[in-house]
Image: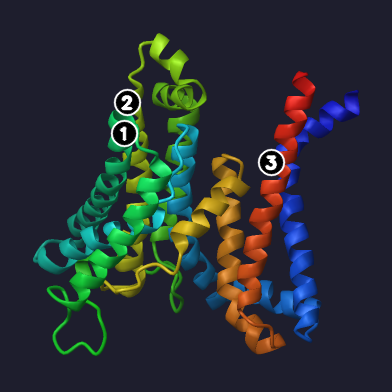
Amino acid sequence: MFIANRIKLLLPILSPLIAIALALLVGAGLILLAGANPIVAYTALFKESLTTYFGFGNTLTKMTPLLFTSLGVLVALRGGQFNIGGEGQIYLGALGSSLIGLYVQGIPALIHIPLALFIGFVFGAVWGWFPGYLKAIKGVNEVITTLLLNYIAINLISYLVQNPLKAPAAPSPYSSLIAKTAQLPIILPGSLAHAGILLALITAGILWVLLVRSPLGYQISTVGFNPIAARYAKISVEQTIMLIMSLAGGLAGLAGACEVMGLKYRLFEQVSPGYGFDAIAIAFLSRGNIWGVVLTSLFFASLRSGANIMQRSAGVPVTVVYAIQGFTVLFIAIALALESRGKVTGDR
């Protein structure tokens, strides 16, 4: 009985690790089918992304939007909401910060950078508020609205960079460069790593305090676990849902802002290569734990960062990395399903 209880306590920690291990094992099988050596391939992938100077900088760069957006998904989950709209919120955040970087001129970086980040947050928050309002007031399922808003955001940015925001004589759809005073500083000289990762880690710490140690965190968790009890406790469920979705959208908006301000320095048609969808997997894999989100974001970022090196060094297609990500999500979903079934059986 004692051993069973210990296993039950460790399950939230062990199940993500087991899911990752199984996904890597399946990935090794795919690498063998591709005619390559899994040990050589994985060594190239993780050595490049985690132990080399430029590779680790690239990993931190990719980790930044993943971490911000995953935190947004996590906040929504804590409040009982499913934010599938991180991708669109990234695009809107990128738009907001780009407008400040392009059209606000002549102010020092000490003001320009926080202002651009704030407007990126606001644009993402507004994009998250819409489905929150529809869910809270009209009862519309937030999964549907957030998913559909992704396509509206992507096509809106596509229109803007092909028409009014397109840089003069640009060979492809993108805006002019934002002002240097709106660009995030590089933290590892000679690499792509910028200050956005520091901001993301600080945000994770603030969010932990907010969700775990504050009355607002209690309010969000109460609405997520039991809206009826929340109403009995005089908590406005509708206002809380809108607040949750706004905060989730704002965090994803910061991801888009950092992509523009720290990496690309202009608004592109394809702002995100799917970070918003990876963030859903990261949040579920981390089982709602903020520090788990940090570590899992690092894992997913290292996969993305080292994929091309793995392809060049071991002849393994980049698509194997996406397969590993997919199998990781599949295995954690199976673990959650088995755990839920075990709870139901235990209740009986």
Horizontal relation, residue 93 to residue 48: left or right:
left
* Tag 2 residue: 238
Crowding at mark 1 (Cα within 10 Å: few <14, some 14-19, many 20+) = many
Q: What amino acid is at disc 2?
A: Glu
> Which sits earlier in the primary sequence, circle 3 or circle 2?
2
Disc 3 designates what residue?
A: 336
Q: Is residue 343 left or right of residue 220?
A: right
Q: Pick whichever, 326 or 290, lies toward us.
A: 326
| As drawn, 281 above or below 179 | above
Could you tell me residue 199's position as x and y percent? 39, 53
Query: CB of mark 2 within 8 Å of CB of mark 1?
Result: yes
Say which residue label 1 marks: 242
Q: Amino acid at mark 3?
A: Leu
What is the crowding at mark 3: few (fewer than 14 residues within 10 Å), some, or many (at least 20)?
Answer: some
Residue at x 32% of width, y 42% of height:
131
On screen, residue 340 above or below 71: above
